[in-house]
Image (cartoon, helix red, strand yellow):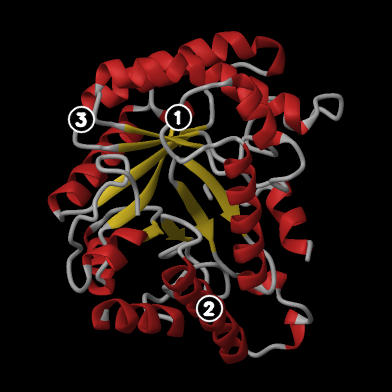
Amino acid sequence: MAGVSVGRLALQGSALLLAVVRSGPAAGPAGDSTTHAAVGIAVHRIDAQSVREVRELGIRHIRYTLYWSLWQSSDYRGKWEADLRRGLSAGFEPLVVVHSPPFGNFQQRERVYLAFSQFMAARARQFSEVHAWQLWNEMDVAFTDVFGAGHDDVSLRERGRLYGEMLRLAYPAIKQANPRALVVAGGIASDVEAGFLDGLYDSRAEYDVLAIHTYGFPLLLQFQRRGQETRRIMARHHDRRPLWNTEFGLERAVIPDHQQLTDAQTESEQLRAWRSVVEANAREHLYDRIYGYVLAEGQDQGFGLIRQDGSVRPAYLWLKAWLHQR
């Protein structure tokens, strides 16, 4: 989540891997290696404070955004690179999600696909320590129209095919630049049975890891249902690749009658949501890896586990205790 999409709001309103590809299970900062390889968290920054907060949790895997549209800014590029280096030095394993094209629209999509593949090859070569790149974010419904999002005459299945066209250029470019790098599909936000995933299979495009996003209330219901539905579609296509959930979380705005809740009640609901999905995945292995959204976002009753004043919410304390006792 590099911003809340219209598709996400609609979704909210509605009701461990093979050898190198399975990444592991490399031991995390503390506790059981399989548990820590399976749980990650999204971060908006990797400053010294964020590093301390993530390490306190006992998490190794972080999801971090690179905005393609900002890369030509020397200020953005310098800060982004410094943050990445800080995270790598701390022992984190970043999943870098790249999106937000600097030019183009649906009519110019082929130019965007080619430019993106070239950009990704350069970044994979430049940052060889990054072993997982996620290509685009909720591209089926938002953030860009180069795959047809926002165009009512472009079905979700066709959007999946167009995303596959991009992958046919980007996947070999990344692999040539860094053969060890995992290519992770962008997190799917639409109903997984509505066509995008089938269109992706129609395209026969290559990628190493499939990814979906999960929001809604109650969070556990969406988390389980979407995982089960995706696994069924994968099985139908004899797809044995890993499945990651690269965004899940709960904010105040999606809780029914949230206007009536106190801050403490809201935080109790967030705790319940995080606890239910993390424990369910450890028990049921629906996803090979999950990334909670988000460590901090600068507000008290949003998705963040850290409040605006830097204090931690109950979900943070529970997750820390759970990971350290595994």
Which residue is pictured at 46% across the width and 18% down the height? 116
Query: Dot 3: few (<14), some (14–19), or many (≥20) neighbours within 10 Å?
Result: some
Q: Quadrant of residue 33?
A: bottom left
In percent of width and height, residue 178 lies at: 24, 23
Whether the residues at callouts 1 and 3 have beta carbons within 8 Å, the answer is no
Which residue is pictured at 26% across the width and 18% down the height? 177
Residue 146 visible? The answer is: no
Q: How many marks do you count on the picture?
A: 3
In the image: residue 89, left or right of residue 117: left
Which residue is pictured at 30% across the width and 76% down the height? 323
Q: Nearer the viewer, residue 74 or 149?
A: 149
The residue at which mark 2 appears reads as 276
SS for dot 2: helix
The residue at which mark 3 appears reads as 128
Q: What residue type is labelled 1?
A: Tyr
Q: Quadrant of residue 241?
A: top left
Residue 171 visible? The answer is: yes
Task: Please determine whether, in this image, residue 218 is positioned above or below residue 132.
Answer: below
In percent of width and height, residue 247 lies at: 52, 55
Query: Dot 1: few (<14), some (14–19), or many (≥20) neighbours within 10 Å?
Result: some
Q: Nearer the viewer, residue 243 or 218?
A: 243
The residue at which mark 1 appears reads as 207
Q: What residue type is labelled 2?
A: Ser
In front of the other: label 1 or label 3?
Answer: 1
Which residue is pictured at 41% across the width and 21% down the height? 171
Cα distance between the residues tagged 2 and 1: 30 Å
Cα distance between the residues tagged 2 and 3: 36 Å
Whether the residues at callouts 2 and 3 have beta carbons within 8 Å, the answer is no
Task: Please determine whether, in this image, residue 303 is positioned above or below residue 245.
Answer: below
Q: In which quarter of the image is residue 144?
A: top right
